[in-house]
Image: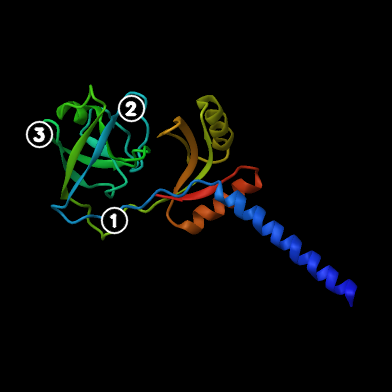
């Protein structure tokens, strides 16, 4: 009887330790990107805007479009992809109308990343950031929660050469592998991801295959 009790306690202890290890590993994964809920037309938000340009020009945005720093576009997680905004620089009163076609900025306290051309039109190229008012002119049709797509992230690297090495290895088997440069408080990162997938189930199945190959893969939602 004492031996059976000891065995049960040992098994319970092993399961507890395994659960703790799994929870610790899961906690290290970055959270998925927030999904914006469409504000009503005419809604106004005040926040800090920045701008992004040469280092990202020509890369694919979260909407699937290629980023053009000379277009009138913006990146945000406060508005769904496809939203049209009037952005006014509160320091000088200058305004510009932009379309949100990307997610960002990845810096705490900022609401919007403008294209280089849009930033120039409201006089914030030199300052880099500015307090702005963002007024919603138009939201994409289809409901309040929009633009949900699923991706599988397989790695995030400070060294672009390392990211490219991983991309090439996976591209030999999969056609949907890309490198996504992002800004982070610690500097620029290069995320290797796969997708987009139409459903979370499809993305989860790919992530499971990547984990079996040894990658720390997980599903992100945009």
Front-most of 69 and 46? Answer: 46
Q: Of the residues under marks 1 and 2, which one precedes in the sequence?
A: 1
For this view, does 147 lie left or right of residue 132? Answer: right
Farthest left residue in view: 93
The residue drawn where x is 37% and y is 54% is: 148
What is the x, y in percent for residue 205? 56, 54
Question: Residue beneath label 1, please?
Answer: 37
Q: Answer whether labels 1 and 2 touch (C-beta < 8 Å).
A: no
Eye-nearest disc, 3 or 2: 3
Q: Nearer the viewer, mark 1 or mark 2?
A: 1
The disc placed on residue 57 is 2
Label 1: few (<14), some (14–19) or many (≥20) C-alpha neighbours in 10 Å = some
* Mark 3, residue position: 93
Badge 2: few (under 14), some or many (20 or more) residues near its Cα, within 10 Å?
some
**Mark 3 touching mark 1, by CB under 8 A?**
no
Q: Nearer the viewer, residue 85 or 63?
A: 85
């Amino acid at each position: 009887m004492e031996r059976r009790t000891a065995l049960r306690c040992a098994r319970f202890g092993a399961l507890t330790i395994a659960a703790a290890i799994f929870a610790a590993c899961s906690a290290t994964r970055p959270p998925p990107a927030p999904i914006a809920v469409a504000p009503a037309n005419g809604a106004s938000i005040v926040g800090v805007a920045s701008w992004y340009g040469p280092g990202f020009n020509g890369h694919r945005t979260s909407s699937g479009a290629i980023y053009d720093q000379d277009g009138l576009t913006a990146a945000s997680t406060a508005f769904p992809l496809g939203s049209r905004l009037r952005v006014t620089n509160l320091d000088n009163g200058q305004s510009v109308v932009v379309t949100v076609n990307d997610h960002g900025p990845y810096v705490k306290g900022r609401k919007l990343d403008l294209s280089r051309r849009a930033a120039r039109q409201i006089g914030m190229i030199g300052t880099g950031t500015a307090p702005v008012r963002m007024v919603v002119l138009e939201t994409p049709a289809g409901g309040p929660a929009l633009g949900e797509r699923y991706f599988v992230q397989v790695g995030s690297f400070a060294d672009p050469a390392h990211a490219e090495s991983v991309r090439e290895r996976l591209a030999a088997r999969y056609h949907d592998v890309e490198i996504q440069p992002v800004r982070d408080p610690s500097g620029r990162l290069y995320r290797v991801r796969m997708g987009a997938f139409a459903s979370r189930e499809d993305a989860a199945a790919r992530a499971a295959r990547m984990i079996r190959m040894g990658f720390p893969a997980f599903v992100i939602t945009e």
